Amino acid sequence: MKSLILASASPRRKELLQQIGVRFTQVSVDIDESVLPNETPETYVLRLACEKSKVGHERFADSPSVGVLGSDTSVVINGAILGKPENEEEAVSMLMRLSGKTHDVITGVALTILGETKGLVVSTKVTFKTLNEAQCRRYWLTGEPQDKAGGYGIQGLGAVFVDKIEGSYSSVVGLPLAETAELLEENGIQYWT
């Protein structure tokens, strides 16, 4: 059985892979996450996922049959990518921008094994209920929005903001499980082990 490295420090991605019984080792990789000029959100998340996967794979160059999984998630509204808020004002601004509207959560996933990288993109529509500024500020004080794209975590306290979703819940959390499991299986990496 081939082994897997998760090239991400995200505790959420770690939990999701554990949920489907994948055996893996987690490593952190550092890449430039700047958006390139004229880059679409789909191209952006796929590029970052591939870069994370390739950088992780280079660390294990002496074991080329090790699979390295990279992933990146962005919250997108009206074509604009919302990153992680740097402060309370930015978080409140992001959440108010999402208030009462439908946005896209786009996740790129990439697997590098034997020097070859395969990737995919999953998009999910998330509709927020109407929020007020006081709610957004209270939410900021919980600490949860500070490391989340778009300033919220659907798997945590931010779930109260979500009216409905259309698509993959696990993708909104950070890793689309059905698609990831298929990618792993196609490359000889088992889940439910």
Image (cartoon, rainbow, N blue to C red):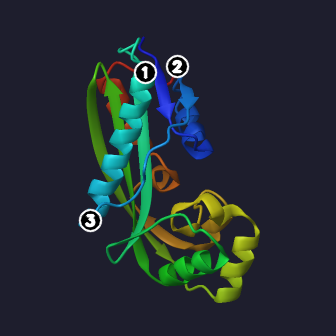
Residue at the disc numbered 2: 193
Q: Residue flagged by tag 2: what amino acid is it?
A: Thr
Assess whether mark 2 and mark 1 are in contact (beta carbons under 8 angstroms).
yes
Q: State which tag comes first along the sequence, 3 or 2.
A: 3
Find the distance from the CA under tag 1 to the CA under tag 3. Answer: 38 Å
Find the distance from the CA under tag 3 to the CA under tag 2. Answer: 42 Å
Q: Residue flagged by tag 3: what amino acid is it?
A: Pro
Q: Is residue 181 visible?
A: no
Question: Relative to residue 4, is residue 96 drawn left or right?
Answer: right
Q: Where does the image place residue 5, in percent across and percent down from the top left?
A: 48, 26
Q: Where does the image place residue 78, in percent across and percent down from the top left?
A: 34, 78
Find the distance from the CA under tag 1 to the CA under tag 2. Answer: 7 Å
Kindly identify the residue that appears in the image at 40 percent across and 33 percent down: 55
Q: State which tag comes first along the sequence, 1 or 3.
A: 3
Q: Residue flagged by tag 1: what amino acid is it?
A: Gln
Q: Secondary structure at mark 3?
A: loop
Foreground pick, 43 / 167: 43
Q: Nearer the viewer, mark 3 or mark 2?
A: 3
Residue at the disc numbered 1: 190
Kindly identify the residue that appears in the image at 49 percent across and 79 percent down: 98
Foreground pick, 91 / 168: 91
Quick one: label 2, few (<14), some, or many (20+) residues within 10 Å?
few
Residue 37 marker: 3
Q: Where does the image place residue 174, in percent across and percent down from the top left?
A: 49, 50
